[in-house]
Amino acid sequence: MESFKEVSENYTLAEAVHEAQRCLHCKVPACKKGCPISNDIPDWIGEVAKGNFGNAMRIINNRSNLPAVCGRVCAHERQCEGNCVLGKKGQPVNIGKLERFVADFDCDAGLSHEAIPEKTRGRIAVIGSGPAGLTIAGDLSRQGFAVEIFEMGSEAGGVLKYGIPEYRLPKEVVSREIRKIEQLGVTFHLNTAIGLDLTIDDLFAQNFDAIFMGTGAGKPKRLAIPGINHLGVRQAIWFLRRVSLYQSGSVSRDEVVVSEGDTIVVIGCGNTGMDAARTALRMGAAEVYVIYHRDIDHMSALRAEYDDAVKEGVKFLWNSSVTNIEGGEGNRLKSITIETKDDGAVSETTMKVDRLMLAIGSVPASRIVSTTEGIEVDEKGYVLTREMPYGMTTRRGVFAGGDVTNRPATVVHAMQDAKKVVEGIARYVDAVKLMESIE
């Protein structure tokens, strides 16, 4: 579909080298400090500037298992690029686009051939194949652990495959990164739901030394609005998944719900809300509104995502809330009531709407915890973990990270958290095996 063609274009080789040569190679690189996973940015950019793309990829691989993904969807303006000293003049080095170029070039040219160590340190089960799970698997595999991923979906990738639209992150890019993880010796078990098909106890019975829960936060939050349970109200992440399934030929066009000429309202102004709004336009909606209860300066979405949404025709209603939803026939709505606050004054309007989408976040499902003894959660259902060893739950040998623990909020923050859990798992397994050897 032409409308879902990737928005941002890649550098040519000459453009990448020229952009890399702008880097000042600061003694204390603020860009590296701004990166949640402490990517050695000046080092690999220096290799790009000399045309040594294989060396650049090797340096990136030391810190990231998903460079082609991070190069596309990271919050660069708030992280690495936002800290670049050249940004003071309004022209920071385009680090994200350079990382994407290196990853894509490396894949196309087949440059990387990593030495894979023998899998002798232990066996690790990873539940979920999103950013956290893939990071755990890649890092531990490189350190000599035999890793197996258990994914409930028919394809690996989690939110990377189904939660981010094709125009921002092509599915083939995600599949390519997953193939790199497989080449490290990681085994994938698809269509396998832990808590249904297998339990944590079943995995331990298969002689895994440790288990990592990276299942994300898959249970959507709800709002207490009259009419919220009407079929015309859907979760934004559900809609994005449906669009992905439609594009892959797994579901028909009418199962996507949004129809040609519809008026769509999205509640929530994070990146998922932006993705849902822009995707609704691509699916033929005539008008799309984003309603947010605060102002533009407090939205969690990236400013660049907002700017792109405005260019594409998305309209924004700030300091506004939906107070009532009037359902229509079938899965269509009639209207919604909107309350807007402006300098202390409160006004109320009614808008004709076909469908409404919720992009207000989610909390963890309880499927795994409810089928396992000894894993404690807080009052909201987030899994409790320890600082030593980092990431271990209240059940010995079971670790957790990512959204299921309520720590990260983006792909790279999930990776950042997972890297700390990697250290915790490695120390735990090594310690257990040492104690077993001297008993």
Image (spheres, helix red, strand yellow):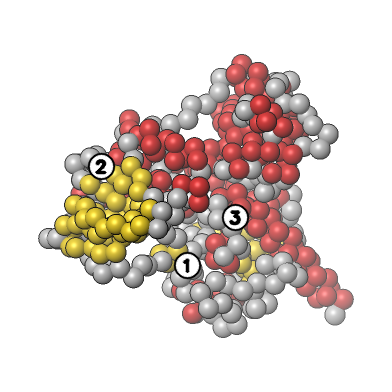
Q: Amino acid at mark 2?
A: Glu
Q: Amino acid at mark 3?
A: Ala
- Which mark, residue 287? 2
Residue 183 seen from this side: no
Identify the residue under disc 1. 363
Labels 3, 2: front one: 2
Residue at image position (49%, 37%) is 304
Residue ID for mark 3: 414
> How crowded is the residue under tag 1: few (<14 C-alpha within 10 Å), some, or many (20+)?
some
Quarter where residue 259 is shown: top left
**What's the distance in space between the residues labelled 1 and 3, CA to CA?**
15 Å
In the foreground, 93 or 202: 93
Question: Measured from the top left, where is residue 187 in percent x and y?
Answer: 57, 55
Residue 83 quadrant: top right
Q: Residue at x 69, y 28 (%)?
A: 86
Q: Marks 2/1: CA distance?
A: 30 Å
The residue closer to the viewer here, 359 or 387, is 359
Q: Earlier in the sequence, mark 3 or mark 2?
A: 2
Kindly identify the residue that appears in the image at 55 percent across and 52 percent down. Answer: 410
Residue located at (21% from left, 52% from top): 351
